[in-house]
Amino acid sequence: VQGGGVAIMVWGCISTYGLHDLILLDGTVDAKGYVTVLQHYLLPVIEQYYPGRPCIFQQDNAAVHTAHEVHEFFHAQHLQVLDWPPHSPDLNIIEHVWHYLKEAMRGLTLARSKEELWSNVEVALQYMWSEDMTNKIQTLYESLPRRIEAVIVAHGGHTSY
């Protein structure tokens, strides 16, 4: 998240139930740090919303996401990770959620420090955790079959999504 010349790194989790945790990360994260994030934030979401049910996790192909240690974590937790085509933001619902977060922050005072930027994110999260946003996220999930079809028709190229 950026604003006023400062940037922070955040990790977020969404599901058909809406936006879950959004956490502030300390700079860039390596594979070990990412596994720690998954242990502390992803697993509780899965346990709360999908207890005893199969769950498929989706993430992009960032190097940290595809590291051996991360693969081992998912295997040990019996979590299926969706194979994700490279360069496919059209299908990645969370990209839209990041856009909504930035829109919610637009009217706020321009941040001059990381602390101020995180404070702005916290203000914007009041909307991000609203029923309205949960409905928007649900609509995005419902649009996935159409998104996939559009990518197929475009032979993997750009779509209107």
Image (tube, rainbow, N blue to C red):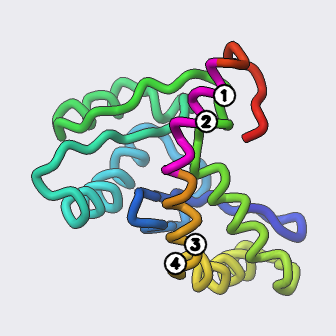
Give residue 78's position: percent from left, percent from top.
17, 36
Location of the N terminus (image quadrant):
bottom right
Mark 2: few/some/many CA within 10 Å (<14, 14-19, 20+): some
Residue 54 vertical placement versus 102 (above, below): above
Q: Which residue is mark 2?
A: 147
State if disc 4 and disc 1 touch (CB < 8 Å): no
Magenta-span inclusion, residue 43: no
Tell which circle, 1 or 4, labels the residue nearer the N-terminal end.
Answer: 4
State if disc 2 and disc 3 touch (CB < 8 Å): no
Tell which circle, 2 or 4, labels the residue nearer the N-terminal end.
Answer: 4
Mark 3: few/some/many CA within 10 Å (<14, 14-19, 20+): some
Q: Which residue is mark 3?
A: 133
Tell which circle, 3 or 2, labels the residue nearer the N-terminal end.
Answer: 3
Q: Look at label 3 and name its amino acid.
A: Met
The nearer-to-camera label among 2 and 4 is 2
- Between the residue at mark 3 and the residue at mark 2, the CA separation in whole angstroms equals 20 Å
